[in-house]
């Protein structure tokens, strides 16, 4: 059992890589501000853009996580998402890449008949 209990917190290769690069971007930008180095600010901005692009690319390659719960067999961060090729429903990243997965079918609720008196 993990330290977080029996839940899927979305730890994925795309998430870990993007977070690491974004943290590095923040550190470089912060150092640039403290040291008054303009080049470090630009480098931090470039690393932030790289973090976003890398995370998006890994998500589209199947190393990300779709919205919502996943089966327990797919909770490990080293498991590739096999549904990423068609796109995830309600996923902005997939829509921006031109992958339009159909939204899950919602069955309309039928109103209950009024009680007869």
Image (cartoon, rainbow, N blue to C red):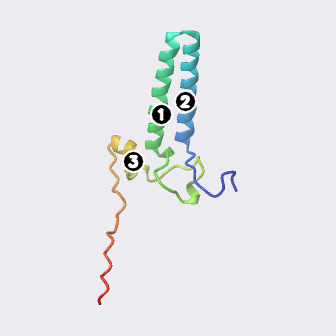
Per the image, the residue denoted by label 1 is 54
Question: Would you call the spot at circle 3 few (<14 residues within 10 Å), some (14-19), or many (20 or more)?
Answer: some
Q: Secondary structure at mark 3?
A: loop
Of callouts 3 and 1, the N-terminal one: 1
Classify 108 as above or below 113: above
Of callouts 3 and 2, the N-terminal one: 2
Per the image, the residue denoted by label 3 is 91
Residue shown at 47%/22% (left/top)?
A: 46
Classify 34 as above or below 12: above
Of callouts 2 and 1, the N-terminal one: 2
Residue 42 appears left or right of 5? left
Q: Quadrant of the C terminus?
A: bottom left
Residue 114 appears left or right of 8? left
Work out whether residue 12 or residue 68 is closer to the camera in this orientation and state it: 68
Q: CA distance from mark 3 to mark 1?
A: 17 Å
Residue shown at 47%/33% (left/top)?
A: 54
- The answer to whether the residue labelled 3 contacts the one labelled 2, judged by CB atoms less than 8 Å apart, is no
Question: Would you call the spot at circle 2 few (<14 residues within 10 Å), some (14-19), or many (20 or more)?
Answer: many
Classify 31 as above or below 115: above
Task: Please provide percent x and percent y for residue 89.
Answer: 38, 53
Q: Look at discs 3 and 1 and give the one toward the viewer.
A: 3
Work out whether residue 83 or residue 1 is closer to the camera in this orientation and state it: 1
Q: CA distance from mark 3 to mark 2?
A: 22 Å
Question: Would you call the spot at circle 1 few (<14 residues within 10 Å), some (14-19), or many (20 or more)?
Answer: some
Task: Please provide percent x and percent y for residue 25.
Answer: 54, 24
Task: Please provide percent x and percent y for residue 9.
Answer: 57, 50
Residue 19 appears left or right of 104? right
Residue 45 numbered mark, or none:
none
Q: Quadrant of the N terminus?
A: bottom right
Per the image, the residue denoted by label 2 is 21
Q: Secondary structure at mark 2?
A: helix
Residue shown at 50%/11% (left/top)?
A: 39
């Amino acid at each position: 059992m993990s330290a977080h209990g029996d839940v899927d917190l979305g730890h994925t290769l795309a998430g870990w890589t993007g977070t690491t690069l974004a943290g590095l971007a923040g550190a470089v930008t912060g150092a640039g501000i403290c040291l008054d180095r303009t080049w470090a600010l630009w480098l931090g901005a470039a690393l932030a853009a790289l973090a976003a692009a890398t995370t998006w690319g890994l998500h589209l390659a199947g190393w990300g996580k779709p919205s919502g719960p996943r089966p327990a067999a797919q909770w490990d961060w080293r498991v590739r998402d096999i549904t990423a090729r068609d796109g995830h429903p309600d996923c902005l990243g997939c829509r921006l890449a031109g992958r339009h997965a159909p939204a899950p079918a919602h069955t309309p609720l039928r109103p209950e008949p009024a009680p007869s008196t």
